[in-house]
Image (tube, coloured by chain):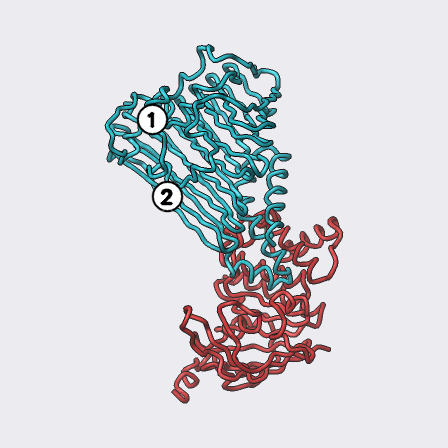
Chain colours: A red, B cyan
Amino acid sequence: MTKFEIRGLRADVLIGAEDREEILKGVDLTIDSGETHAIMGPNGSGKSTLAYAIAGHPRYEVTDGEVLLDGENVLEMSVDERARAGMFLAMQYPVEVPGVSMSNFLRSSVTAVRGEAPKLRTFSKEMQNAMKGLSIDPAFASRGVNEGFSGGEKKRHEILQLELLRPKFAILDETDSGLDVDALKVVSEGINRVKAETNVGVLLITHYSRILNHVKADHVHVFAKGRVAESGGPELADALESEGYERFVKAGA
Amino acid sequence: MASPNTGVKEHSHGGDLPISRLDTHGSFDVAAFPVPTGREEEWRFTPLRRLRGLHDSDGAATGAVTVETQAPEGVSVETVGRDDTRLGRSFLPNDRVSALAYSAFSEATVVTVAKDTEVSEPVHVKVTGNSEGEAYGHILLRAESHSSATVVLEYAGSATYSDNVEYVVEDGARLTVISLQDWERDAVQVSHQYAKVGKDAKLTNFMITLGGDLVRISPSVRYAGRGGDAELHGLYFTGAGQHHEHRSLVDHDASNSRSRVEYKGALSGEDAHAVWIGDVIIGEGTQGTDSYEYNRNLVLTDGTRVDSVPNLEIFTGEVEGAGHASASGKLDDIHLFYLQSRGIPADEARRLVIRGYFAELINRIEIPDLRERIMDEVEEKLALHE
């Protein structure tokens, strides 16, 4: 049983050497293992900032609040320590790292997170199976990390990492964006496999409700102006789909 | 068709500094070039006092190097005297050090790949320094028409050394030369590598500079016919106190010729100094030239210095492509963030990114042992400053 808590989180985006802007204005959220929470909200509401601030992205700075994984404040950990503690972020824009092969990267990552190097042959089989499950051509294993991948290929590889790293808690940031119907289905199946096999807690950030037809959310939160504006059950997603975000954008403007 | 460039006309005593590379003339006469003072455009980045006389000596060889060779069947390797008529026919020295080296060497190594011969095993030429004092050398690598071969030219040991290396790539031939500057930390080298690329011939050059106190290499390419192709890849890792200088010159003096110059370096440690000068000339009256040059520097610590100067001169309107790029910067923190967000510790993430930066270039070398050796040496130098 894992508990993930965000308490009073405030964070700035660092724009230049001197320039910064507050994006998160006090976020509170609690997610238990096995639960999936969707965060929905209009563009610019701070959804991605929430994801990056929790992961420790160098362009964001937390100014107040805490993020607890089973009571441990992950904000006091380095980026790699957070991952080894069981956190995972599937990024909206996965980073291209030229010259580092995907297979080498995955092996290094799995070794670090599991605390020991997997046997080469076992790992290679595990990786191939996971790739197959996500309809990824085996040739990608020898290509540079995300190098020249299409948007959809990058997203599949994020979920591939989710499957291999088996975190306690995962944030999926707009994993559905840029995917066609077939790819969305493949990626959603991957997420559901991990949920079924590991009891991971999931924070699913999305702009559209269509991924929620494939990945079932237990709770839905509307994010607006840097905080959670409203929380409800899956029906809230349907309401947002028909009504849009207008009332949240206007509220308090 | 030939433009009046390097290697075709004798030095004139105009007295003015050359403005265009077109004004750089060649001569075998040492006296035709004044002793550099360090104020000249082509010498201003080089610390002359560290050359140990290679630029202003009288040409007496007071030191020596040994040359070892190893060649597969189909390739002949000879050690010849100064009077061998095949030497010095493909170039004219374009500065004083080059002319001095040509006047001072006593024996030359000639590697010949016979016409229509394709060899897959590499030819090895290893120059090893083991004594004090200036040493001079000369190497001629000849790929006869429609032959194909790879030469690994390695420099090791301690020396104060200067040489000229001629690459003669005849019509339709393919020559790959990997020049590995793997000197001991105290060595000084000034080399000129003059390539002449024939009709539809291809030269692939890898310049790997890791060792030495000061290494200055000037690779130049001319085309002897249409359709020639030259790829110059460079990799250097410049550590504390080292001076690595690469000055490439590609003279597109024939039509439909292609060139790619891609040099990537890393600098780490106090007073590491890397210089890259990339000159490309697209000659008058030529057509269909396709050229691109690129230099990137990864600055790993404070206290280093990079000088990167691309220079493109075009004397025709009939160009297919010509471009250049130069960039120097630190490791991308977003690359590191991504790897670390997958649990990979910071120092390992750093190593992976730097390895990746060089791997793109190293992986084009088709000799697995050599690839591994270069990568290992890069990592050793990296470990010194972690």
- Please name whichever residue, B110 or A9, is drawn nearer the observer in this view of the structure: B110
Location of residue B43 with respect to B83 vertically, above or below: below
Between disc 2 and disc 1, the foreground one is 1
Q: In what element is the residue under mark 1?
A: loop
**Nearest to N terminus: mark 2 or mark 1:** 1
Q: Let me know if residue B197 appears in the view.
A: no
Residue at image mark 2: B309
Q: Residues within 10 Å of mark 2 (few under 14, many from 20)?
A: some
Location of the C terminus of chain A by quadrant is bottom left
Q: How many marks?
A: 2
- Please name whichever residue, B300 or A216, is drawn nearer the observer in this view of the structure: B300
Location of residue A41 with respect to B311 vertically, above or below: below
Q: Chain of mark 2?
A: B
- Please name whichever residue, A222 or B318, is drawn nearer the observer in this view of the structure: B318
Residue at image mark 1: B33
Residue B310, image x and y in percent? 36, 42
Location of the N terminus of chain A by quadrant is bottom right
**Left or right of A31, for residue B191:** left
- Disc 2 residue type (three-letter): Val
Residue B287, image x and y in percent? 29, 30
Q: Let me know if residue A12 appears in the view.
A: yes
- Please name whichever residue, A31 or B228, is drawn nearer the observer in this view of the structure: B228
**Left or right of B67, for residue B222:** left
Residue A73, image x and y in percent? 64, 77
Q: Residues within 10 Å of mark 1 (few under 14, many from 20)?
A: many
- Disc 1 residue type (three-letter): Phe
Residue A182, image x and y in percent? 54, 60
